[in-house]
Image (cartoon, coloured by chain):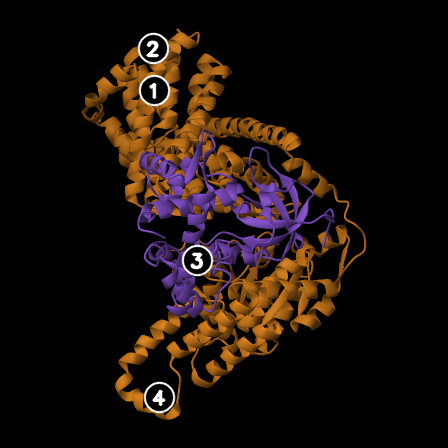
Chain colours: A purple, B orange
Amino acid sequence: MSRAEEVSATIEEYLEAIYTLQERNGSAKTTELAKRLRVVLGTITNTIESMEKQNLIVHEPYKGVKLTAKGRKMALDVVRRHRLSERLLTDILRLEWSKAHDVACKLEHAITGEDVIKPLEKALGHPKTCPHGNPIPTESGRLAEEKSEPMTNLSPRESGVIVKITDERHDMLQYLATLGLVPGASVSIEEKAPFNGPIIVKVMSASYALGQNVASVIWVKKSEATATLGG
Amino acid sequence: MSCHRAFAEIKEKTDLTIALAGNPNVGKSCVFNQLTGLNVVTANYPGKTVELNMGVTAHNGVKIGIMDLPGTYALSAFSDDQWVARRGVLENRPDVVVIVVDACNLQRNLYMVLQFLELGFPLVVDLNLIDYAAKIGLKIDHEKLSELLGVPVVPTVAIRGEGIKELIQKAIDLAQRKVKHTSHQIEYGRDMEQAVQTLEETIGKYMPKTPYDLPSRALAIQLLEGDPEFTQILKEGESDERRGKQQRWRHRWRGGRPSQQEILQLSVSLAKQIEEKHGEPVGVRIARERHDLAGTIANAVQVRVKQPTLLSEKLKHYSVAPYTGIPLMISVLIGVFAFIFFVGSLLSGAVDSFWGSFISPSMNWLIYSLIQNATLTRIVLWGIDAGVLAWLSVGVPYVLTFYIVLSLLEDSGYLNSVAFLTDNIMHKLGLHGRAIIPILTGAGCNVPAIMGTRVLTTKRERILASTLIVLVPCSARTAVILGAVASFMGLFYAILIFAFEVALIGLVGLGLHRLLPGESSGLVMEMFPFRTPSVSAIAKKTWFRFKDFAFVAFPIVTLGSLVLGVLYETKYLGLIVDPLQPVVQGLLGLPAVAGIALILGILRKELTLELLVALAIVQYGATAQNLLVFMTPLQIFVFALVVTIYIPCVATVAVLGKELGWRNALFIMGFTIALALVVGGLAYRTLPYILPMR
């Protein structure tokens, strides 16, 4: 990356946050962006404007912002550095998982340029995923992922298999795991409340009500066959 | 009382001790209630909101201490309830653990059974709800289950007491064999098993004393899972060792004994190997393997003899499906409140007239003859006559009835449907569906409701929910609304005040959610089918909620009545009230006497109306019995509105302080005063233009 194209840590943070929100919801609302970046709404506007000028994002009224092809490429680069940093922190420095995410947020801006990242990737043994199971983008910015969608996209009586859980909070992952909500588990949707309400999902022989914000981080691969009752 | 001490005392008094474990909603408390009476000790760990109940029972002459662990899905250290359950058994070392499992939902329930087996506890499995399992067409071979798990399994129907005696006998038999650790092992998949064994051998060889005396295999699994508590213990143990380095370094060199730090490192590297191979965190891997094993066992012991066509499952569907569920919920809630007001007012009237014609006169005579001083007598009567009567005529008819109905709804499983349907709205207020239960509880009395916010996980949610609860009109405030507004203005205006309150709760929730830093967590709640509630469980649940009202709120309120009596009888009231007149008369447009009633209402909310009438009689003569003699309908309306909003009452403030800290309590208090003044002032100025009010 040339000097002129080098971007500030702030913009990198924004790119990463927009990427994550866009993956989840299709676009990034500015209110959600503010929440995720822990800043007030007012400060966002300036940065968003300057990013728009740099042709990194497009702003769609009422929907929020979306990454352009250029923005997406840069975002994937940040994501790659973030997830590799997490690996470095957990695998080599033996930091606890729950702490890795926050530290990696700072570290990712320091290790730039493939001349640093490549040796790091090699030292880590070319990991495919971050410690939380999310895929690490390759140098060319490609992601190896199974086709899946958030559980909230499914309709009642549809079923599927959990592919990944994109929440990085350790205790949440572990809690969902004890209920049997782990990648690979078969689930079927029993009920769905209107207006983005919670859903009831059946896993094994138990049913759980999951709030929208929990269900949307559970990605499933929809199966063709309809769900069968009972276990 | 601390858990450890409470249990040590019980251990001393009894021949053996049992811990009761199990998932939520499997009838565990039903088993506990069958075994113990009302004499239950409640203890909690400092800083943890989840409590442990302990009780004592006897069977064939053997005295048994029982510890009821919180209902959890697993035994990890990631949430408060699980932490307390685990610490409870690890620290107190009961002689045997009885784990209650739901026969209808074997696979999920077996997960924790496997965890207990891993930890090496002598175990008896209580296969409960066997009647429901039969109803949904499940046949379970409990002997085979016992064989596969290597522990006794007793089928029970706890709600009817079936099988409980046998269960206890099995537990006693096992306890008397005094086995320290069970030998039965759960085997994991090849990679996992290898890692576990490698670590287990190292621990077995080099760590003569494990934390809580755990079997080395159990510790190995905990470390591989990355359990924060055990990892911490090993780290700290290491620093002790470093302090003793002078004496030990020689020994370490010669014996090649790895330190705890090295054991920890070994576990981390083993965990990493598995993570790399299977592409998922070890904790998740272990959970998955346990679920798989639980599934294999469940499938081996149960046969589905027919497809379930249960009425309760259909009802459940209708109760959560949007087009049927929402109308149903609204009618159930209206029905509940109508029922409570009907039954409550009947009972309350009966109590009032009984007290007024028998107890009050004799108490009056008795105290006067004891004290021989008219003023002093009146002060004492403020406390014990009026105070106790209020407790009897508000507490028992309204609060108690309400809690019986609430527990019925909760135990039948219907409140889960309500939580599901309201999750969306609650989410907008920064909460989730489960918060609906404490908020509804607030309509009885705010005190148990605020204690009930312990079911919420974060401090932020507890502050949000508590603020909203404080705005829910409790029985005392409802009495004022009905007594003032409904009696003198009509039911429409009373309902209008309730509607106002609901809107206010919504607005305040929306606002606070935006203002308070932090994010709201999501709803994760099991939906279990409707069940017939057990009478003993309902009685106990009602009692626990009512106890908070009776023993926490009531003494504070009675004391408040006494203070009130002193102020009132000695005519010092004016000193406090006079400076506030501009606010009361100017801002709210109320008569001066209303100010006194409002100030004293902090001590006892339901007294505001009685006081208002009593003070008005002094000022305007006996006709002031009718509020309309000295107040306009608008003033009555504003008065009732302000009464329902400002500072709940001393008892609520005390509980807020205890549960959330005094800073938050003061904040909530100040906030409600400001809100009451703003809303009251606005209502006074704008309502006449909107509604026909003179």
Query: Is residue B444 positioned above or below A184 on the image?
Result: above
The location of residue B572, given as percent across then percent down, is 20, 27
Q: Residues within 10 Å of mark 2 (few under 14, many from 20)?
A: some
Q: CA distance from mark 3 to mark 2?
A: 73 Å
Q: Which of the numbered marks, if any, corresponds to residue B630?
A: 2
Q: Is residue B211 left or right of residue B526?
A: left
- Residue at figure coordinates x 32%, y 43% from the top left: B657
Q: Residues within 10 Å of mark 1 (few under 14, many from 20)?
A: many
Q: Which residue is mark 1?
A: B680
Q: Is residue B507 left or right of residue B413?
A: left
Amino acid type shown at disc 4: Arg
Q: CA distance from mark 2 to mark 1?
A: 19 Å
Query: Do discs 1 and 3 belong to a common subunit?
Result: no
Query: Do discs 2 and 4 belong to a common subunit?
Result: yes
Circle nearer the N terminus (1, 4): 4
Q: Which of the numbered marks, if any, corresponds to residue A83?
A: 3
Q: Which residue is mark 4?
A: B252
Q: What kind of element bears circle 2? A: loop
Query: Do discs 3 and 2 belong to a common subunit?
Result: no
Q: Nearer the viewer, mark 3 or mark 4?
A: 3
For the residue pair B467 and B648, the one nearer the viewer reads as B467
Query: Do discs 1 and 4 belong to a common subunit?
Result: yes
For the residue pair A30 and B199, the one nearer the viewer reads as A30
Amino acid type shown at disc 1: Gly
- Residue at figure coordinates x 58%, y 74% from the top left: B191
Q: Chain of mark 4?
A: B
Q: Is residue B675 left or right of residue B294?
A: left
